[in-house]
Amino acid sequence: VIAPSSLYRFSGHLTIPNGVTLRGSYNVVPSHALVDGVQLDDGTVFIPLEGRGAASGPPFITIQSNALLSGVVIYYEEQERVQLPVAYPWTLFMTGNNAAVMDVELLGSFNGINATLAHRHYIARVQGQPLNIGVFVDSTYDIGRIEDA
């Protein structure tokens, strides 16, 4: 599934099902500043609007077995920049065998990537400023890979 360059606002959650790739416009990991007044106006930008103040809620995107998220910016537009950060649920939750995340930028994410029970996960070229936890890996029975994150 190709998501062309645009700002996409989400009031709910996404699941990338088994064997599906959700690919944005970036071929390499993008880089933006998380400062007031900066408008993101290039590339594929996902803006989650649900979950503010609810760290234990469902993740923004669940990536299932043999699925891939690639080439996007995930931008928490409503995240505080001056006051204390506001909790949000996990941005990305990887599950099953061989889930993958590549070339993704996390802007204003509270909890970035959770790879619990994500056997043989692959995380590559992820950057940004998760405010609480960047990457969490637990209970994997086989070798996961994290590169340039």
Image: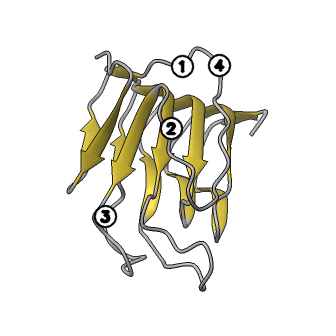
Q: Which residue is mark 1?
A: 26
Asked whether 119 or 20 is in front, the reply is: 20
Q: Work out how far the residue at label 1 is from the one at label 3, CA to CA, in angstroms.
A: 26 Å
Does dot 4 land on a helix, a strand or a loop? loop
| Picture layout, residue 18 above or below residue 139 | above
Amino acid type of the residue tagged 4 in the rendering: Val
| Picture layout, residue 141 above or below residue 34 | above
Circles 4 and 1 in contact, beta carbons < 8 Å: yes
Amino acid type of the residue tagged 2 in the rendering: Val
Q: Which one is earlier in the sequence, the residue at label 1 or at label 3?
A: 1
Give the quadrant of residue 124: top right
Q: Which residue is mark 4?
A: 28
Question: Where does residue 17 sit, x and y in percent of width and height?
Answer: 26, 31
Direction front: furthest residue: 37
Circles 1 and 2 in contact, beta carbons < 8 Å: yes
Question: Where does residue 79 sit, x and y in percent of width and height?
Answer: 49, 69
| Picture layout, residue 53 above or below residue 134 | below
Question: Where does residue 49 sit, x and y in percent of width and height?
Answer: 30, 61
Q: Which residue is mark 2?
A: 73
Amino acid type of the residue tagged 3 in the rendering: Pro
Front disc: 1 or 3: 1
Q: Which residue is mark 3?
A: 58
The C terminus, quarter of image? top right
Circles 3 and 2 in contact, beta carbons < 8 Å: no
